[in-house]
Image (spheres, grey):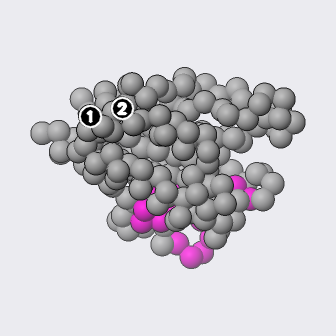
Amino acid sequence: MTKVLILYYSSYGHLETMANAVAEGARAAGAEAVVKRVPELVPADIAAKSHFKVDQAAEFATVAELPDYDAIVVGAPTRFGRVASQMANFWDQTGGIWAQGQLVGKVGAAFTSTASQHGGQETTLFSILTTLMHHGMTIVGLPYSFAGQARIDEVTGGAPYGATTISGGDGSRQPSQTELDGARFLGGHVAGVAGKLAR
């Protein structure tokens, strides 16, 4: 069975929700999907004052386990148009497995969240995908066969480079049905491609 890791960081829970939707899509496509997160770097008192969602169910991932998966789908929010430091810090520790080429040929994909429609979704996706490409991973995006990303009748995330959601400046907007469908589609697409490559 194809093994897919959904590896995410989420300050306020938006990407936690998206990660679980990606996992649903992967499982519906017949894969084993595991949802894990990276550690928080913000001091606990500041996280509490900032109302971070610290009680997330997902276990913390380790760098050592990454080669155990056929595909890794990485989700992190934007920070000024690039990936959040919590996720960057995790991948900065992967030099050992990079040197050994342990992720070469595995499938990689990305998802993100921004406060506004034009708040750096695509640049953040690319900052995630760049790291995965340096590891030699085979990149999978969110194709336009997911018709939801071409909608113009509602405000929605989604890009050919990965699934996205919009949180609103105060974080009050939760992922829409279209955005969750995009995350599920991405998970299923990644599982399908990884399964074909594993044959």
**Occupied quadrant, residue 70:** top left
Identified at 66% across, 32% down, the residue is 40
Q: Which residues are magenta?
A: 151-168
Tell me the chief SS of the magenta region: loop
Q: Where is 93 relative to 197, above or below? A: above
Q: Which residue is mark 1?
A: 100
Q: Which residue is mark 2?
A: 96
Q: Where is 10 relative to 157, above or below? A: above
Q: Residue 34: x percent and y percent? A: 43, 29
Q: Residue 119: x percent and y percent? A: 65, 66
Give neighbour class at mark 1: few <14, some 14-19, many 20+ (Cα, 10 Å): few
Identified at 61% across, 40% down, the residue is 86
Depth check, front residue: 121 or 182? 121
Give neighbour class at mark 2: few <14, some 14-19, many 20+ (Cα, 10 Å): few
* Secondary structure at numbered mark 2: helix
Q: What amino acid does circle 2 point to?
A: Gly
Q: Residue 111: x percent and y percent? A: 50, 52
